[in-house]
Amino acid sequence: MTEVARSRIGVNTYLAPQGSLVDAITLESLQQEVNQSLESGETQLILDLAKVPSISSRVLELLVEWRDQLLSKGGSLTLVNANPVIIEILYITEVDKYIKVLSRDMQDDKTPSDPSRYLNQRLGNLLIQEQFVTAENIDKALQLQAATGKRLGTILIEKGWVSETNLLRILGKQLGIPYINLRPGLWDASISTILNRDICQRFMVFPLFKVHKKLILATSDPQDLHAFDEIRKLTGFAIKPVLAKGEEIARQFKESVDTDINISEYLTNLEEDFEVMDNALPDDYTTIDEISSGSPVINLINALIQRAIRDGASDIHLEPSRTKCRVRFRLDGILYEVMNPAADLHPALVSRLKVMANLDIAERRLPQDGRIQVTTQGRVVDLRLSTLPGIFGEKIVLRVLDKNRSLLDIDKLSMTQQNQSTFIKLLKRSHGLILVTGPTGSGKTTTLYAALNYLNSIEKSIVTIEDPVEYQVDIVNQNQV
């Protein structure tokens, strides 16, 4: 089959690729046809994209280069019959500013009839004008902003007064930044890995395309100049932000991460820098399932824990289903799938973890809690294990309690100077009560252990009552109830 169909009508040369331009063969054929046209003096080129489902960053760069070459010869480049995804790609990368696109069906929120009316206006006023929020709620949000220091948009979303979609649309119009519904096809797989996963997760960004020295970056916070500056320094590219919802960025990032892990590597090639501590089997446990006593399963569990600690995961989830076992890591509050062992391997993995935590391996119908302590990478790491019976087996959650990654220092709690001074003054009192409250993940445990670490010294006798003991602190007498 011909990769690129060629026809000529008058002075116009029509080139119609017959498949995806992400495919190297089709793209090479198109390049040859364009070069042939330039050599033959055919300078009025029309690319028919009717049969092209997607394009890549390399295609975008070539389109700009071809346009420049044709323009220098007095010609032009026109794109026709592009599908909505390609049209949106041309829009967010601004390639459509240089190349004529016929039959473009842009949405109203991308090309407002009067963009000037959105510029230099306050966000609250714009939201009221569009009837996305009431003036009363804006006033309340402004009061909360003055009290908390949070951004207005964050407060409006947290209170449920405006949806993130509507907020980002208005914010995009106010700042002149495109807003997109991020989905497969709107990002180039070869570019999505240009930033390492830590940077993407820390700043909640996702690389979409690269056009020469410009990186198109999806973000839910277009005013995070620090993030853009750091990414610019890392890549050497100018940053063009595109607005997208945070949950969509997280979803596409997850899909871009390669989850096809070779389990055999875990079963055979385990790093030596790993040792399980305090894992002696109780006297009444004499045997475990034969499969779980084999070294491959032990290596797999140890390697998973090693990787979780190395990646900075806060939790490890092992979840059984009808056909497979799912292993997920929680990184910065979001779960990412890292492995899918066979379903028949799940009971052995559960048994191994129960042995490490000194739990009853015969009990499969009641929840159990335990603790594991390992040493790896030159440090001791505690893990809190919880089991929960389900219809396909027991779900396991391992909470990784790495003191080296935790902020066990009052100076690193990000308190204001006044609050920190007050907190330390209270800690120095000989008696009293300090209540630390807040939702899950708000930093209660970190704050309490930071206080404990501040008070801890060889001259003092400190006793704690905890449920459970999450971190083991030297010298302190910790009691679990």
Image (tube, grey):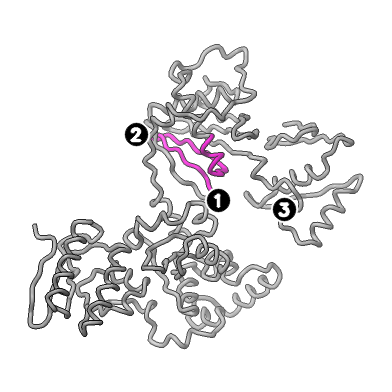
Q: Which residue is mark 3?
A: 412
Sooner in the amino-acid sequence: mark 2 or mark 3:
2
Residue 392 is at least partly visible in this image: yes
Checking the image for residue 332, the label placed there is: 1
Residue positioned 46% across, 33% down in the render = 390
* Element on which disc 3 rests: helix
Q: In the rendering, at what x and y percent does residue 241 appear?
A: 46, 69
Q: Is residue 80 magenta?
A: no
User: Which is in the foreground here, disc 3 or disc 1?
Assistant: 3
User: Which is in the foreground here, disc 2 or disc 3?
Assistant: 3
Q: CA distance from mark 2 to mark 1?
A: 29 Å
Q: Which residues are magenta?
A: 306-332
Q: Which residue is outermost to the front?
A: 39
Amino acid on which disc 2 is placed: Thr
**Disc 3: CA contacts within 10 A as few (<14), some (14-19) or many (>=20):** few
Residue 103 is at least partly visible in this image: no
Amino acid on which disc 3 is placed: Lys
Q: Is 18 or 24 nearer to us in this picture?
A: 24
